Amino acid sequence: MKAKTKEEQNNRLRERISYEMRKYFGQDMDRVNHALKVAQYAEEILKMEGGHPLVVLGAAYLHDIGFKEAEKKYGSASAEDHEKEGKTTAEDILMKLNVQRGIVYEICDIIGHHHHPRTKETLNFQILLEADWLVNMQENGFFKDPKKIEETIGKYFRTVTGEKLANELFL
């Protein structure tokens, strides 16, 4: 049996992360579908902009994994609460899958503040942020308000590919 390449190993890990996300959310197809759409946009941006595929797609699949625990603990899933709970849940999932510690750390860092960008962010974070906004804009009816779309694009989109996608989808 031949040894797997690094790319094949990473592809397999991404599939396993996606599987764990689906298993975790169970019948909550809204959350599963949201994560899958975010991952799809993230992959599209990633192909053009670069970045670390395992980090970006791992964060895309798991970025809202804290919703269930936040709702259970706090009675709601505010951005802060699901970010905090998401870091812990994501770390548990990733460690169970034997993901390299540095990658676990970066994915969990992204999840832990994905609604609250810092002044300076990594490309991996930026790709996840833009992919999540693309899906949120679709799900929340932004396409009906051109001013809101322009403000959101101006505030959150930094990659050429993400901005182009947002303009094509909403303007």
Image (cartoon, rainbow, N blue to C red):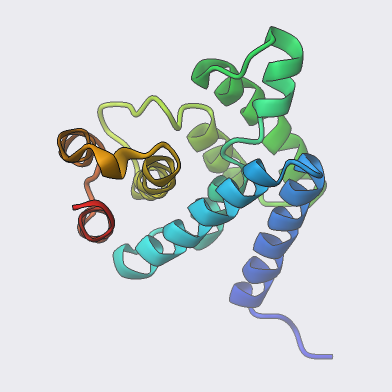
Residue at horizontal 20 percent and vertical 55 percent from the top:
167
Q: Is residue 58 at least partly visible in the picture?
A: no
Point out residue 109 in the picture as x, y percentages from the top left corner. 52, 33
The number of numbered badges drawn on the structure is: 0
Say whether residue 15 is left or right of residue 111.
right
Q: Is 39 rendered above or below residue 138?
A: below
- Residue at 17%, 40% (x, y): give it: 146
Q: Nearer the viewer, residue 110 or 102?
A: 110
- Residue 154 in view in this figure: yes
Q: Is residue 86 above or below residue 50?
A: above
Q: Is residue 156 left or right of residue 28?
A: left
* Residue, far top: 74
Q: Quadrant of residue 49?
A: bottom left
- Residue 86, x across and y down, in percent: 64, 29
> Foreground: 104 or 155?
155
> Residue reaching furthest front?
144
Q: Is residue 111 above or below residue 21?
A: above
Residue 1 on image: x %, y %: 84, 91
Residue at the spot x=66%, y=51% of the render? 100
**Horizontal side of residue 94 vs 36, given as left or right:** right
Query: At 70% from the left edge and 18% from the top edge, which residue is drawn?
Result: 71
Where does the image place residue 88, in percent across and percent down from the top left?
69, 27
